[in-house]
Amino acid sequence: MNLLPLPFLDELAALRRDIHAHPELAFHETRTADLVARELAARGLETHRGLAGTGVVGVLRKGGGERAIGLRADMDALPMPEKNTFAHVSRNPGRMHACGHDGHVAMLLGAARHLAENIESAAFDGVVYFIFQPAEESENGGRVMVEDGLFRRFPMDAVFGLHNWPDLPAGEMAVMTGPVMAGTSFFEIRLHGRGCHAAMPDQGIDPLVAASHLVVALQTVVSRNVRPGEGAVVSITQIHGGDAVNVIPDLAVLRGTTRGFKPETEALLETAIRRVCAGIENAFGTRVNVIFNQRFPPTVNSVREAEICREAAAGVLGVENVRRNERPSMAAEDFSHMLLEKPGCYAWIGNGSEDGGRALHNPYYDFNDEILAIGVSYWVKLVETALRPK
């Protein structure tokens, strides 16, 4: 490995653990944003606040070059209890940094600090925007930052993201071209029947029977509509209906999610689900309403920016430790909204440990502090690669 000498690494680990101990939910990352802004200002960076409420952007310039890139880290935690017992366990009940955003913030702050403190020797020419984004977990903070004028206020040529990945060993990274994370929509299906006594089902229209058939029928949406080998998912995650054991209710509600790597695939899934629902409506006499809510578009890396990231990662870890063809994830990521506006790349950094690490969104998860130096070194190398002096 070709890691940077980071005399402040212990401070960075302590900062990461402090953030972990004080997790904040979407659009309420006030303490975290204060910490970020304080750290950036202490290193002499121009610091801006207020985008998407709690968002923070630090600006570092060198030379007279007009080229600019953005580096993004997410700040929010998840609404779930933590089951760890170490000293930096969450002090906010029901909230936990179970996705490593505490580590993402620390790595980007470390890169900003190193570049600012070594600005004379840093090998880049241009502008670096350090973007600290709120509300990645389901609340679309990336979209809100774009809508609030991120790219108008801070013009940049490309934008880059980084996420820890427990499935990858520490010391490896994955940088794919094209789709890397799926697009996702949430849906709700309301089946209206006619309630009646459970002993007299002939007098009603049973929405629970219709809902049961619908759940089974929806399993054919992917298997019989999506081309084999092309990733897509339809999952029913909630079924609600009925209150009394001797009453057939007049309403059943299904909720779930679709996932796909292409906009046309997502459109196909919605069309097929609506078609199946119309068939259930005709077959069982229920009235069926379908509501779709697109949450995140697919996260798609551009070719040139992916190559820049691979070069930077290989410069830190060696080319043999940079995976090019890792399978994309069906999880979603609101960094996709930034990639709709600018070319860029979203990379994975291995978070695994000797025992394989804990899965993301697991109550025992913790970010691996051993990879902080790798993340900082990668970000710095990426700046020097993307903004290499001409």
Image (spheres, rainbow, N blue to C red):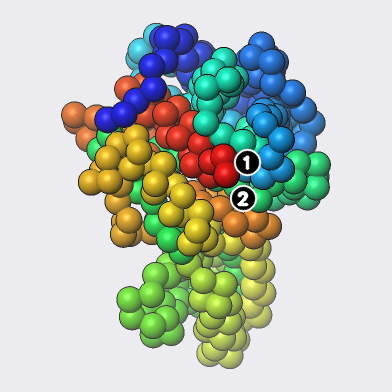
From the top left corner, tell me how far across and down residue 169 is, in percent. 25, 38
Determine whether 362 is above or below 16 in the image. below
**Which sits in the foreground, 240 or 74?**
74
Three-letter residue code for mark 2: Ala
From the top left corner, tell me how far across and down residue 79 is, in percent. 54, 33
Determine whether 104 is above or below 172 in the image. above
Q: Secondary structure at mark 1?
A: strand
Three-letter residue code for mark 1: Gly
Residue 98, quarter of the rendered image:
top left
Query: Which residue is at a point 60% across and 69% down the rendered structure image?
Result: 189
Q: Is residue 265 visible?
A: yes
- The residue where tag 2 is placed is 158
Q: Secondary structure at mark 2?
A: strand
Image quadrant holding the C terminus, namely: top right
Q: Would residue 307 be found to the left or right of residue 64 on screen?
A: left
From the top left corner, tell me how far across and down residue 296 is, in percent. 60, 57
**Which sits in the foreground, 294 or 134?**
134
Query: Which residue is at a point 80% across and 47% down the rendered structure image?
Result: 152
Image quadrant holding the N terminus, namely: top left
Query: Which residue is at a point 67% across and 45% down the rendered structure image?
Result: 67
Query: Which residue is at a point 69% across and 15% down the rendered structure image?
Result: 44
**Which sits in the foreground, 384 or 53?**
384
Local crowd at mark 2 within 10 Å, few (<14), some, or many (≥20)?
many
Mark 1 and 2 residues: CB-CB less than 8 Å, in contact? Answer: yes
Residue furthest to the front in view is: 390
- The residue where tag 1 is placed is 70
From the top left corner, tell me how far across and down residue 47 is, in percent. 74, 24
The tag earlier along the polypeptide, 1 or 2, is 1
